[in-house]
Image (cartoon, helix red, strand yellow):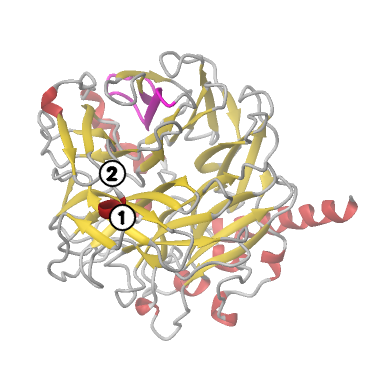
Amino acid sequence: MRRRMIWAALPAIGLGALSFAAPSSAVADRTGPHGPFGFTTVGLGTGPAYGEPSLAMAPDGKHYAVSTPGSDGQQHGTVQVWHSSDRGSSWKHTFFTSDNGGGDSELDFRPDGTLLGADLEVGTNADSEIHTSKNFGKTWNANGSAAGPEQDRQWFAHSPDGKREFLVYHDLIAEGEFYVESDDGGKTWGTPVVVNDPEQALSLPGVAVGPTEGSVPSLLDQGINTFSGPMLVDNNGKDFYVVYSISNLESNVSPNGGGIPPFGAVRGLIVAHSKDAGKTWTNKYAVVAKPNPSDPSKEESTGTMFPWGFLDQAGNVYVVFGSTRDAGGGTSHYGFYYVYSNDKGAHWSKPKRIDGLPGGKGSIVFNTGAAVSPGVIDVAWLQKDTSAIGTESGVWHPWFAQINSANTSHPQITRQRVTTIANHRNGVCILGTICLLPSPVNPSSGDRSLLDFIELTVNPKTHLAGMVYADNAGLRPGEGSKGEVVFAAQTKQPTSGSGHGGNKGTGGNGGNNNAGGGGSLANSGGSPLMPVAGLGLLILASALALWRRRAH
């Protein structure tokens, strides 16, 4: 979730009267196997905290954990956790508490089975408080450890041997990508390390140079508008990657740039790479929109919402993201795409569209994925078939696809709706805290109830996918006007004849081309001074990093 200012969080106070229903194992809130991949679903219990759920699977392939930020409605916890010991068949609920937590949550099962939970603290702390569970999420230590100051949207990662634990995040003051590291399993954390490269301070903005794939992104384009993705650690323990997307100077200053100045539409997808286990970094565009200074409203939005990256076992790099590139640009009709690199990010493929929506019809939102094996990946997203992302009509469903030969120019995509039960009605707002503001400041939907992402992962033993998403359409039994997290599990793998061939889909696509964009800005809770101050701090941090490299 993008960082919320205190005033922006006030509407949530009214949720205090709500409380979580018991996590469901009843038949009523379950659906049976559906589609070629046999997806089943189960609701984890209604309550006020259900947006942007995180999912982690233990190395034993049996223990799962899910978290969402916020209270249970009875002032219990700042992160809600559900845990399962039977691969998601049944679930139990618990929580942990941080002093000023409830901003964002994140989970990571370490190689030894220890479960880490991060709780983004709001206010004077502005860091993540890290808690630990030694019994797969049943109980948590009461006193967490602080990791990384001034942060927004945090993600865990760890080295293959577990000796190094990382928390990567966007620094909302320096306006750059940073990480902190723990060498004792998350008990203590070191000082922040900048991921942005000094070359970015010297690079001209895109409107001046017309960047392409492989170009160095300019800090003037990054500004204050960043969607931060995860850190990826290769099995060799040396190649690290950090994925993020940014707007550009042109869209940030234009009232027609697809956002609200200084928060323009997202224009580029960046992958930072370190080939020396995090000592030095390069930052390059993997995908970039062509600047259109004469009419920024026609420029494509690329990299929305949070871009999601992952590696397969052969070290191939994949990134999934939303873009309006096939819809004539703008910020209304997003498609779901991926790119890959077979040479550690030196070169990237052309974007390949995954969903089956016709160009300019319907929209997707949120991106997630994981590798099954070399060249085989699973991905998921939310999709509305009939209208633009911010239009107050239509219903959304969770979708899944498996892509074979994903690291070639001829991928084979098989996709399906995860369930016939819609998870959300009408529009989705992706304008950060501006979603709370009335028209004409926010001309589209103000509904940000799903928050900002869903998550998919692949079981390390069965190699079948599991995913979690927020549901508040009121169509699941017992849900009513409340919302809940839903866990979906793949139960079968199609044969090569039905699951591995062609570009197939089930569930139906298409519909009317209704107007109404949702925008694509991020990090919009900050002060107008943040672009200048943040840029100065990031240039200083990059200069210091360059001096340190030359001094050693």
- Can you tell which of label 2 and label 1 is closer to the viewer? 1
Can residue 68 be found in the magenta stretch?
A: yes
> Amino acid under label 2?
Leu
Which residue is painted at 55% across and 54% down in the image? 316
Q: State the quadrant of the N terminus.
A: top left
Q: Residue at x 69, y 59 (%)?
A: 197
Q: Provide residue 4's location: percent of width, then percent of height.
A: 41, 43
Inspect the image, locate mark 1, and give the three-letter code of the amino acid beneath it: Val
Q: Residue at x 36, y 69 (%)?
A: 258
Residue 152 visible, this orientation? yes
Residue located at (25% from left, 62% from top): 363
Rendered image: mark on residue 450: 2
Q: Earlier in the sequence, mark 2 or mark 1?
A: 1
Q: Are marks 2 and 1 in contact (CB under 8 Å)?
A: yes
Camera-nearest residue between 195 and 271:
271
Q: Is residue 265 left or right of residue 21?
A: right
Percent position of residue 483, x then y? 20, 34
Q: Magenta stretch containing residue 333, yes or no?
A: no
Q: Position of residue 540 (x, y in %)?
A: 73, 56
Q: Which residues make up the magenta segment?
A: 61-82
Q: Residues within 10 Å of mark 2 (few under 14, many from 20)?
A: many
Looking at the rendered structure, the secondary structure element under dot 2 is loop
Badge 1: few (under 14), some or many (20 or more) residues near its Cα, within 10 Å? Answer: many
| Residue at the disc numbered 1 | 365
C-alpha span from label 2 to label 1: 10 Å
